[in-house]
Amino acid sequence: MADASLRERRAVVRVIFLGPPGAGKGTQAARLAARVGVPKIGTGEMLREATAKQTPLGKEAHPYMEAGNLVPDDLLVALVRERIGEPDCGSGFVLDGFPRTLPQARGLEDMTGGDPHAWVVFDIEVPRDVLMLRLSGRRWCPRCQATYHVVNDPPGRPAVCDVCGTALVQREDDRESVVAHRLEEYAQRTFPLIEHYRTRARMLAIDGNRPMDDVFRDLVQAIEVPA
Ligand SMILES: [Zn+2]
């Protein structure tokens, strides 16, 4: 539920989440957006929606996604520009998965009038070995899409879906070697972004290796009490 006092204190709330795959950004971004009463904008969801609806940008992005390639910066920037121009973003937004590169960050600044100093950038930090365990332990039911984790959220019977009894599988993306590659790629692409925001925005490093509620409490506090 939206918290009116939060909205009164900050006219426009613009939040960016940085953090490696497995850091819990998506979940925290959704919770924070709901708490503050602004939309959560996830580029992954937007891309899937745009391609499903066959919008002009969706059609352009489709071949990249199908080939498993990264969607070019200018295409993503155009997609985000379209989204944050909608009326529900008037009080701000919480971004999840964007920007990921320096050109994307500059594109975002262009479309919002330049100055990111009032923005809050959360950098969710989680040790590499913890991320490896989190990601490579994920299992998924190919029939009903239920998700599990071999350690944190195991099914009642090993490797069998609680809901429909189907054998669970590991997504290609979550295999250990692929995870290692994803984490390296993230570090390489995001380092310049962290440097970019360190001096231009209110960037806060958040210890993401804690229970989700503890992490969330820190995020809310950071927004409630602007430095
Ligand atoms: Zn199932």
Image (cartoon, rainbow, N blue to C red):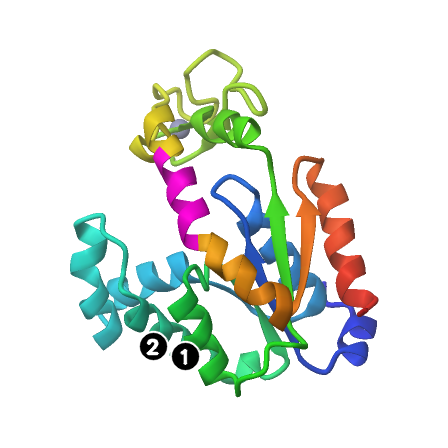
**Left/right of residue 77 with respect to residue 220 in the rendered view:** left
Provide the residue designation for mark 1.
81
What x and y, as percent, mark residue 212? 69, 41
Q: In this view, does 16 lie above or below 186?
A: below
SS for dot 1? helix
Q: Is mark 2 on a helix, strand or loop?
A: helix
Magenta segment's dominant SS is helix
Residue 24 tag number: none
Residue 176 vs residue 50, the one in the foreground:
176
Q: In which quarter of the image is residue 160?
A: top left
Q: Which residue is the extreme one toward the top?
A: 158
Q: Nearer the viewer, residue 15 or 62?
A: 15
Amino acid type, residue under disc 2 in the picture: Ala
Q: In x, y percent, where is residue 157?
A: 48, 12
Q: Nearer the viewer, residue 83 or 73?
A: 73
CB at mark 2 closer than 8 A to ligand 1? no
Which residue shows up at 64% across the image and 72% down it?
119
**Which residue shows up at 47% across the image and 42% down it?**
21
Instruction: Please rate how many residues cluster around mark 2, counting C-alpha atoms within 10 Å: few if below 14, some from 14 to 19, many from 20.
Output: some
Q: Are marks 1 and 2 in contact (CB under 8 Å)?
A: yes
Q: Residue 78 carries which label?
A: 2
Q: Can residue 125 be seen in this view?
A: yes
Q: Which residue is drawn at 41% across and 79% down?
A: 81
Three-letter amino acid code at the position of disc 1? Arg
Residue stretch rendered in magenta on the structure: 181-189
Picture residue at 52% right of the left edge, 83% below the top: 112
Residue 32 percent location from the top left of the image: 66, 59
Give the image quarter of residue 129.
top right
Q: Left or right? Give the position of 122 relative to 18.
A: right
Q: Is residue 85 visible in this depiction of the protein?
A: no
